[in-house]
Image (cartoon, rainbow, N blue to C red):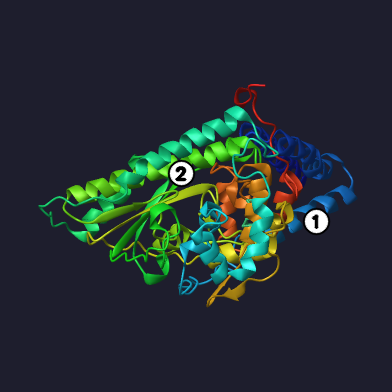
Amino acid sequence: MSILPNIFVAMGILVGATSLVAAWQIRREGDDRAAGRMLGLAPWLTAPWLVAGLVAAPWATWLGVVLLTALGILLLLVLPPWGRSAPAPDPGGPACLDERDTMFSRAEISPGSDRFDAYYDRRPASREPDDAWRERPGLLSPDAALHDPIQFGAAEATFETVTALHPLVEGEPAAERRELDPAAASRFLTHWARKLGARDARVTELRPHHCYTVGGRGDRYDEPVDLDHGWALALTVEMDKEAVDHAPAGPVVMESAQQYLASGAIAVQLAILIRRLGWRARAHIDGNYQVCCPLVARDAGLGEIGRMGLLMTPDLGPRVRLAVVTCDLPLAASARRGDATVADFCRLCEKCADVCPSAAIPRGEAVEVDGVRRWQIDQVACFGLWCEVGTDCARCVQSCPYSHSDSWLHRPVRWLIGRSRPARWLALRADDLVYGRRPASREVADWRRTG
Ligand code: SF4
Ligand code: SF4
């Protein structure tokens, strides 16, 4: 007697059980709609195997053989490392990063002030688009479309707490200097950062393209940046998935603020520690940067820069916040990853460009900007949307396939898309099928509402 029918039935049970467990896990991760879709797919994935195994007819056996062959071809496509490329070459960075060009700096200059006039004399093309978002209510404004008094109030309270850390970002080092082995110092600081709550922490040499050339915030405005530290430790903290899934509603700006605080507190704590060892150190935290954190983090090997212009980490994608500590304590650089598969996935994906309400994220290939090949988002359009809704939106972060939970369900997919181009293509199709091409925002949880 042929064992083929038994194999087909066993495959049916395996596929059915896997689909049901996947649906259960997706529901646990909080996406009821995607869980429902997965549940709806289960009978379609299971039935052909069961028919092939349970119907005693030659055509049913042939159906089973076709299914087995298709499965074999699929495994051959996704398992071997087709498309696992060599590390991407070091992309470097722009020759000149002027903090006064960032949207937060532009938002700080008051119309009619000397700074305002000087800025738009220098950048006349920015005047008209900037005037357009200045007419909108503004980030965390009571008149913004998504204003909620307690959610916006919670975010403002957290940003105020971050500002309270600013006086601690710099300071005088202790008079007595402790000499440390660079590798041991790096190992201690990166492990300690993780113990303090960082998701990951790595070290790079501080390079000229990491640093702003001129300050653009507060009393650092117009001040040349002269950061002569040799080393930088970059760290990430995870943004809560449930909060990000509410994007663009208020919980997302609460979460951004909270993780700026968490990352900032760790960076300040590390900087103080290094200064107590007698070395100069500066924390770079929200509202008080002298470096561009995503570039430092990329060069330290924490991830790659994706289509939406944010750092894409291997296990949480862009669902992180960053902080950096620079210092002259000699450290040992972590290996740069240079994972070219992230850019390849972004080339196929374009999901963030599809969901972006302000059409700020470019489609198509990366282009050369300031000597670096990358995707450049329209920061004026993005910030204009923030000024309309009052939050930092984050629909792009919410919808990115890399932002899924770091769970047993998504880890094998991340592993496969890191080694095989066909797997990247298939994973994207599956993501569209289960989560949707434009994943819906999650209903704001009751505990976050007061009205
Ligand atoms: S949504 Fe897609 S294209 Fe956009 S950053 Fe994420 S992976 Fe890249
Ligand atoms: S934050 Fe919102 S507006 Fe800005 S790029 Fe992302 S999706 Fe677009």
Q: Quadrant of the C terminus?
A: top right
User: x and y percent of residue 354 in the render?
Assistant: 74, 55
Q: Is residue 13 visible?
A: no
Front residue of 284 and 132: 132
Q: Is residue 42 left or right of residue 124?
A: right
Residue 428 screen position, x and y as percent: 69, 55
Q: Circle 2 sits in a helix, a strand or a loop, which is it?
A: helix
Residue type, label 2 = Tyr
Q: What residue did someone put label 1 on?
A: 66
> Which of 344 and 24 lies nearest the eye of the viewer?
344
Going by the image, does 54 lie left or right of 152?
A: right
Image height check: is 433 above or below 113?
above
Q: What crowding class fits label 2: few (fewer than 14 Cα within 10 Å), some (14-19), or many (20 or more)?
A: many
Q: Quadrant of residue 77?
A: bottom right
Instruction: Pick whichever of labels 1 and 2 is earlier in the sequence.
Output: 1
Tell me how far mark 1 sits from mark 2, CA to CA: 53 Å
Image quadrant in which you'd find residue 229: bottom left
Q: Is residue 82 above or below residue 70?
A: below
Type of the residue with mark 1: Val
Which residue in the structure is indicated by mark 2? 260
Where residue 180 sits: x, y (%)? 16, 56
Residue drawn where x is 46% and y is 44% of the image = 260
